[in-house]
Image: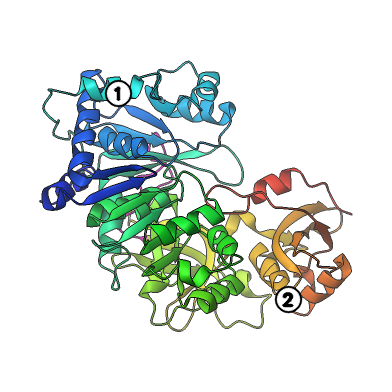
Amino acid sequence: MVASNLADLVREAAATAGEKTALVCGSTTLTWGELDQQVSRCAAGLVAGGHAAGSRIGILLPNSVEFVVAYFGILRAGLVAVPLNTGYTSIELGYQLSDSDVVLVVTDSDRAGVLRDAREATALVVDAADGGWQQLLDAGDGLEAPEPATGGEDLAVLLYTSGTSGRPRGAMLSHRALLANLDQLASIDPPVVAADDRVLLVLPLFHVYGLNAGLGMVAKTGATGVLAERFDPVETLALVREEQISGIVGAPPMYVAWSMLPDLGNSLSSVRVALSGAAPLPAAVLSAVLEASGHHIFEGYGLTETAPVLTTTLCSQVAKPGSVGRPVPGVELRVDSDADVAEDDDESADDPGEVVVRGANLFSGYWPDGAGGPDDDGWFRTGDIGYLDADGDLFLVDRTKDLIIVSGFNVYPREVEEALLAHPDVAEVAAIGVPHPYTGETVKALVVVRAGASASADELIDYAAGRIARFKCPTAVEFVDELPHSLAGKVARGRLRDSTPTLG
């Protein structure tokens, strides 16, 4: 059977390995057969509720069995899943609910209040005391499991991209795009996820990385997913050890935190593949994990719009620090170089340019009319700046929207950040552009120092000047206790810029 609807993957896993454990969540365990039955009950209940094919159904839940059942149940019913960020305010949720015209939201009692504040919408509360979730499943009892009315090019998931400015836009991901990326990942050797893997699912399932590269690959291969509601360094590392996790789909903050804990090597002894994405992984952390555990962390790169994975160091001959690897099978990638982009960098023979991609995993444009999608030839401009080395490995420089223009010269924040991260006193840093009366913009660095460190602002500026051109160096350094991050692990530069005054 060739899957056309993403929920077909659950049915296939149930048919081939029905007694095998599909999900572990705390004390709850479901086999693939049991999961398939619950997905069918959920789908039948939604259809019985009168929701027409293509209607948008929101999911406002943490990582849980209920999230998984609701997600695949929505898709099996021929509806569109709209995963919602559990950390959003009522204002942020209200915009997305209205923009996508969501008709129903599956949530829990902890989030029902913020949902009511967001919009007068019908909310199905997942709570034992309330009984709404059980009522939905019960409504599907005795009804024949629906055959999906949608698949292929039909819209499966609407995911809102965060961006750094302006309102988020809903990326339209079809069944075709999501399934294509799973096929691309499944063709990598060694496998990203194998059938006998136990995979840690701690990245939020409302993010495309956790949703498809994590949960999707577990369903694709019939592996076992071990769900964690939130990332706690000590608790999740203990979970890796106790559940004998063999596959980790992670982000840099996870490895940064784990690298500081004792007994890291023993805790990771069962791990076969450790993956990192969503943000750059500091080379020092990669080395620390490798030294402690013997495990290399394989980095990757992708976008919400590409469902999501584009490249991985699993596809490289050698996993190079700082590189995000080569394109996964089935993805074409080129770098459109602009001579002006690299003219100020005499040290590199590789010209950076915008990363442009093509493949069956690309989205169908932004909601609702498909604007901003791939061009007529199937190419999509990512907005990311990078370069390919002689071996064809991709190195990212930064996002075009994050460019800092100093006296007409381009400065990429990541260059500044990497220069300062090499200083032994610096734990984390974010470089941002702030208005300047003479140069248009100047670079400001917000720095989190390691415990007991004594570096001064002047010392760090001088240190950076030894590694990057002077115009790229920060003219101001502010020491902060922490930096804001998105739940995907990225430093939220937009929030930093919004709170930073003009210099000069």
Type of colouring: rainbow
Q: Which residue is mark 2?
A: 468
Q: Nearer the viewer, residue 138 or 443?
A: 138
On the rendered image, what quadrant is the C terminus found in?
bottom right
Q: Is residue 193 magenta?
A: no
Give 457 or 311, whichever is nearer the viewer: 457
- Look at discs 1 and 2 and give the one toward the viewer: 1
**Residue at position x 81%, y 70% in the image:** 460
Q: Residues within 10 Å of mark 2 (few under 14, many from 20)?
A: some
Tell me: residue 309, above or below residue 171. below
Q: Quadrant of residue 350?
A: bottom right
Whether 310 is drawn above or below 203: the answer is below
Q: Which residues are magenta?
A: 358-374
Query: Which secondary structure, mark 2?
Result: loop
Kindly identify the amino acid type of the residue bearing the numbered disc 1. Gln
Residue 238 screen position, x and y as percent: 48, 57
